[in-house]
Image (tube, rainbow, N blue to C red):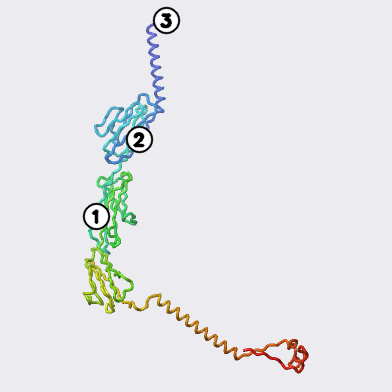
Amino acid sequence: MILKPSALLCFYSVWGVLLQVTAVKNKSKASQGQFPVTHNATVIEGGTVNLTCRVDQNDNTSLQWSNPAQQTLYFDDKKALRDNRIELVRASWHELSISVSDVSLSDEGQYTCSLFTMPVKTSKAYLTVLGVPEKPHISGFSSPIMEGEMIQLTCKTSGSKPAADIRWFKNDQEIQGVKKSQQKDSNGKTYTVVSILDFRGDRRDDGAVIRCRVDHESLNSNPHIAMQTLEIHYMPIVTILPSTPLPQEGQPLTLTCESRGKPLPEPVLWTKDGGELPDPERMVVNGRELTITFLNKTDNGTYRCEATNSIGQSHAEYTLVINDPNALTGPAATDHALIGGIVAVVVFVTLCSIILLGRYLARHKGTYLTNEAKGAEDAPDADTAIINAEGSQVNAEEKKEYFI
C-alpha cells in the first residue's frame, strides 16, 4: 500500500513526538539517581580553601555554586560574582570545584551546590573560618621584685575563634590553678582571652623564666609564647668557713665569710666579741677572708661577719677555741685511757680473787677414807664401822689424811 504524502508527514510527526517523550522519560529516570556530593571545609583566616561538588552520573546537566547569601559564584565554568578571590579550579559534567583565597571571617557559612535536574537537587557544605589568636604579651611585671612581695602577671591574646587556651609555665613546669576569662571582640565573632597569675616573690625563683603559652587549633601545634625572666632581690645569707676544724696554738687560721644575696653584699665587716679586731697586725682582712697569722690563747672568742645590701643585713658567728698541740686530744687519747683503766680493774679483781681463795682453802681441811675403811660406809656408828672394816681390826686406829 502506498501512503499519500500527507499521511506520511503525519506518521513522521507522531513518531517524532513519541521519540521525544521517550527521551524525556529516560532522562527523568536517569536524573533520579543523580545527587551532588559536597564536604564541609575548615580554613584559617587569611588562607585558601577549595569547595568541590561532584556528580557520579550526569547527562549534560549544569552545576552551580552559591555563597551563604545565595549569590551565584559559578554556573558551570562561568563566573557570576565579581570577586577576585574566587577562582575556578575545575569544571566538567561531573565536577565543579572553586577556590576562595584570603578568606575572612565573613566568608564563614553554608555554601550550596545545585544540580539543575527536574526537580533541582542541592547539597550543602559548611565553611568554618578559624580566627588566629594574636601573639600574647605579659604585663604587670616591674623589675626587680622584692622577696615576699605579691606579684600579679597578666597574659592577654585577642582575635581567636574559637576562644584560645592560655597556660602558664615556670621554667618547664606547668603552673596549676590560674584564673582565666574570655569575652567576645567587637566583631562578635572572635574572642579575647585573659589569664592572671598571682605569686609571692621568693629567692629560689630568682632567674626563673615565666612563660605564657597560647594554644589554638589554627596554630598547627606551634603555640604562641611570651616569656618573662624573674629578678628577685633578697637580703644576704651568711656562713663562716674555717680553714681547719681544730685550730692549734702557733698555727695560722683563715675564716672565710660566704654571703649570698641580691644585690650582692660587698664588702663584709669582721668583729670580735662585739668590738673591733684587737690585733690588726696578726688579724688581716682581705675581702671576705679574715686570716690570723699566728694563733695564741688570747685569740679565743666569738668572731662575727656581717653582710649588708639594699634589702637588709645578716650575720654569722664563729667561736674560736684554740687547742694545745702538746696535749693528747681527740678520740684516740680517750680510747687509750679507757682501755688502761679497764685492764687495771681486771688485774686487781683477779689478784683479790686468788688471795681470798687461798685463805679459804687453808682454813678448811678435808678428810677422805682409805682402803682400810672400805665396807664401813653403811655402819650406823663409828664402833660398828671399825668392826666391819676390812681386816676386822677392831682396835685399829682411824687413819686420816689431811691436805692443805
Q: CA distance from mark 2 to mark 3?
A: 60 Å
Please tell me whether residue 44 is drawn above or below residue 254 in the rendered image: above
Q: Residue furthest top?
A: 2
Residue under label 2, please give it.
Answer: 124
User: Closer to us: mark 3 or mark 1?
Assistant: 1
Residue shown at 37%/24% (left/top)? 59
User: Closer to us: mark 1 or mark 2?
Assistant: 1
Helix, strand or loop at disc 2? strand
Quarter assignment of residue 74: top left
Quarter assignment of residue 379: bottom right
Q: CA distance from mark 1 to mark 2?
A: 45 Å
In-image side of 266 versus 364 (left or right)? left
Tell me whether the residue at label 2 lies in contact with that at label 3, contact meaning CB atoms closer than 8 angstroms: no
Seen from the viewer's position, the closer of residues 232 and 128 is 232
If you read the primary sequence from the N terminus, does the residue marked by circle 3 or circle 1 appear first? 3
Q: Quadrant of the N terminus?
A: top left
Please tell me whether residue 209 is drawn above or below residue 91 in the rendered image: below
Residue 257, percent from left and from top: 27, 68
User: What amino acid is found at the position of numbered circle 1 in the picture?
Assistant: Ser
